[in-house]
Amino acid sequence: MSEMWTAKLRKKWQKNLPIEKLLPDDQPAYVASWIYVFGVLTLSALAMIIFSGIILAFEGPAWYHTSDAGKFVNSLHFWSVQLFFVFMVIHLWGKFWMAAWRGNRFATWATGAVAFIASIATAFTGYLVQTNFDSQWISFEAKDGFNSVGVGAWFTVTNLGQMLLLHVAFLPLILGAITVVHVLMVRKRGVVPPIDAEPSSVSEGGR
Amino acid sequence: MSTVKESFDAAPWKGKTKRYDIVKEGSVALAFVMVLTIILSLFMGSPDETPLTFKGWAVSNSDNFYATAVQELAGTSGTATYGAPYNKAADGLNLGPLWLQKWAGVTRPIDSVNDFVISPLSTQVMSTDIASALATWNSATAAQKQAWATAYDDAITNAEGKLADVPSGAYGPVPALAQGLTDMAKAGALDAALLSQGGFFQTDNTKQILFFGDGAYLDDAGTAANLQGGTWGMMNETGRYPGQAWLWLYSFWYQIPPFNNEESKPIGANADAYIMAIMGVLSLGLILIPVIPGIKTLPMRIPIHRGIWRDYYRSQAIRKPKK
């Protein structure tokens, strides 16, 4: 009898990503630079974006125009997005200069790059649903770019309802899924070794 | 890179390790970001410029609103002459032989005459003059309507937008319709009328946004707020707030020739399409950096990594026997 799909999946998961890799209590000694904190800072800012975004979603897109509490939550959302991009760009540059795709880590790099692009799309739709002058201006200006390559026939930046749904449902789902896959790949593959590290240099091992 | 080195980089690290509390790291990072975000929010707030309204436009620049209404009737406005996805008045932009805008078709049809002028006017309790003008317009042939509106639009253009200088002529009901729409906008009734066409629940502001863009009001406000594309406007925000700085590369192309010259064919005249294509290719390039010759080896040739892993390299230098 062939093995059950569930059993196959469990074995594969346990082989590739055991709990020791998912929640490690040690790491290579070469991980000793401030550049490493920008990955977790990016995730933290994303958590703040989601938290403040959920509150905004409950109250609706026009809430923050008329309420001090709404204005504060909108400000949390605004600044966590700004910080998110600052952290993510530093993280991205850091990983580039580490050539962090080495050692079968192409997919880790690629999912990170796709997450960056998806973040830009998500933030862009956020600017369109501010329901203020800025969103009027951005939607009028941006439509030409999307229309010029035919995308505007379906992705209508002047349609508040469409942009709102994409911003609070579809795009966060995509971004969240890519981010989870990216983090799991980091845990599975581990942190990339220094560029000039040689097999002969690690024979001693241990803490 | 040799296969041995690639296998080594891929294998679990066998060398020196140190204690690492991943849960503590995540918790401290989250607390740090929370505090930083709260401080920024309390002291800086967030941008929220009040949206423009048709009432504001018609009150502050009545002549421009009036002239724009005439353009909508004459079919000479930006929306009326746009092409896909709103109408078939133009072929739109192209990427060489690729007419993607045209090929995508008219998926969001807009009839500037009826959607922007006649239908909103028809929803109002109107004066005898406007009711009579609407009846005259609705009973005229298409050719007659076009002749009236074109003659009046040309006359306003020749008078450089100064309505007082426009000579009398065979304009039919067009002046009355334009005045009726201007009065409607001044009363604050046009904003809702444009949105509510077609039913009770409406979430699509396309008609409002496009009508706004046909006049000078939105454009002037964008210029005043330093938001125009030619001045890096796509990455700016109103007030003194940071905008979408991550769009800097997209904005960059609009600042340099030939993209910043609409007269330059074929690229400048189709800048939007070319820049979207360039950014598509560059985005793909970002994803594929690990396999692009020349770029994938850049980190090995420029030793920034020596700073990132300086402790490791220092320890290796100590371990290596001096020759």
Image: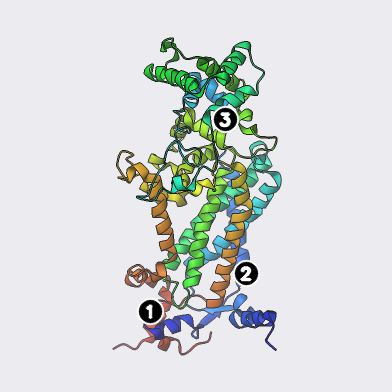
- Of the residues under marks 3 and 2, which one precedes in the sequence? 2
The residue drawn where x is 35% and y is 71% is B297
Q: Is residue B161 visible?
A: no
Residue B24's disc number: 2
Residue B115's disc number: 3
Q: Is residue B218 left or right of residue B318?
A: right
Q: Is residue B92 above or below residue A26?
A: above
Identify the image quadrant of the C terminus of chain B.
bottom left
Residue A196's disc number: 1
Q: Is residue B174 visible?
A: yes
Q: Out of A72 and B275, give the one closest to the viewer.
A: B275
Q: Secondary structure at mark 2?
A: helix
Please state which of the two labelled residues, at mark 2 or mark 1, is closer to the viewer.
1
Q: Out of B48 and B22, give the one closest to the viewer.
A: B48
Q: x%, y% of residue A78?
A: 57, 48
Q: Secondary structure at mark 3?
A: helix
Cα separation, mark 1 vs mark 3, equals 67 Å
What chain does mark 1 sit on? A
What chain does mark 3 sit on? B
Q: Is residue B44 above or below residue B61?
A: below
Please state which of the two labelled residues, at mark 1 or mark 3, is closer to the viewer.
3
Q: Could you tell me how many numbered marks the image carries? A: 3
Whether label 1 touches label 3, CB < 8 Å: no
Q: Is residue B107 left or right of residue B155?
A: right
Query: The disc labelled 3 sits on which kind of residue?
Result: Asp
